[in-house]
Amino acid sequence: MYSFRGEGAGRAVLKVSGVAILALTAFASGATWLVWAALAASAIGDAFLAGKPDRWLLPGMAAFFLAHVFYVILFWQLGEGAGGSWPVKIGQAALVLGGAAYIRWLMPWLGKMRLPVLAYGAVILMMGAAAIALPAAYWLVTLGALMFIASDAILAHQLFCRPAEAPPQKLPSYAVWFLYFFGQAAITLGLLPAAA
């Protein structure tokens, strides 16, 4: 993901290893394949995004798109019949409407990335809505999914709204990584067989 540090092999390894370890943990624990497949796709996305954004952004987004598809399928299965209460519907509506408004606000800066961002935004909001509908026992998963969305919102602002020649900002970079990694860790912990 976005970082204030320069490019290099060490940076790429650092970015990929955290979520790759989560994927291996999920696999070794016997979690459903949708969990470790989503984490593996995320690690691949991290590998792409560790390179130059102008070259590797689209493949990275595609990998994360696939990760969110896996999460949507899994959360939909786990939350079957749990999404009918008014608090859940209100939460889902707030997320989707807020996310749609944010994407609409980004439009002037997106250029040729408009369609990819629209597609990615749609799937990540579907993932978040499905996570909100999860039973209360999966609260950690819901929290992790919302952290993931917050991370991507900050990342989108850094990638698209700031001048290309502007130096990266440390605080948003730390926020992106904190929310992203610990969001994925919360999702993983909440979905491990022993935690279910």
Image: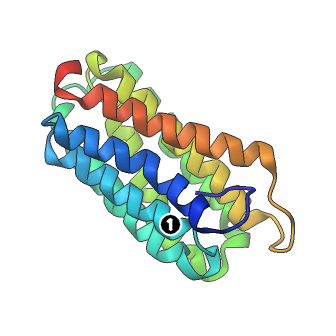
Q: Is residue 72 visible?
A: no
Which colouring convention does the figure follow? Answer: rainbow
**Quarter containing the C terminus:** top left
Tell me residue 64's x, y (percent): 41, 60
The residue at the point 67 percent across, 40 percent down is 175
The residue at the point 52 percent across, 44 percent down is 149
Horizontal placement of 36 versus 184: left or right? left
**Quarter containing the N terminus:** bottom right
Horizontal placement of 134 versus 99: left or right? left
Instruction: Looking at the picture, tell me which residue is in the foreground, 75 or 23.
Output: 23
| Quadrant housing residue 2 | bottom right
| Quadrant housing residue 31 | top left
Judging by the rendered image, the residue that carries numbered circle 1 is 118
For the residue labelled by badge 1, is the local secondary structure a helix, a strand or a loop?
helix
Q: Is residue 168 above or below residue 128?
A: below
Tell me residue 7's x, y (percent): 67, 68
Tell me residue 174's x, y (percent): 69, 42
Q: Is residue 187 above or below residue 138?
A: below
Q: Please, which residue is most extreme toward the top here?
A: 137
The residue at the point 22 percent across, 25 percent down is 82
Q: Within 10 Å of the Cα at label 1, are there few (<14), some (14-19), or many (20+) other Cα atoms?
A: some
Q: Amino acid at mark 1?
A: Leu
Q: Is residue 24 visible?
A: yes
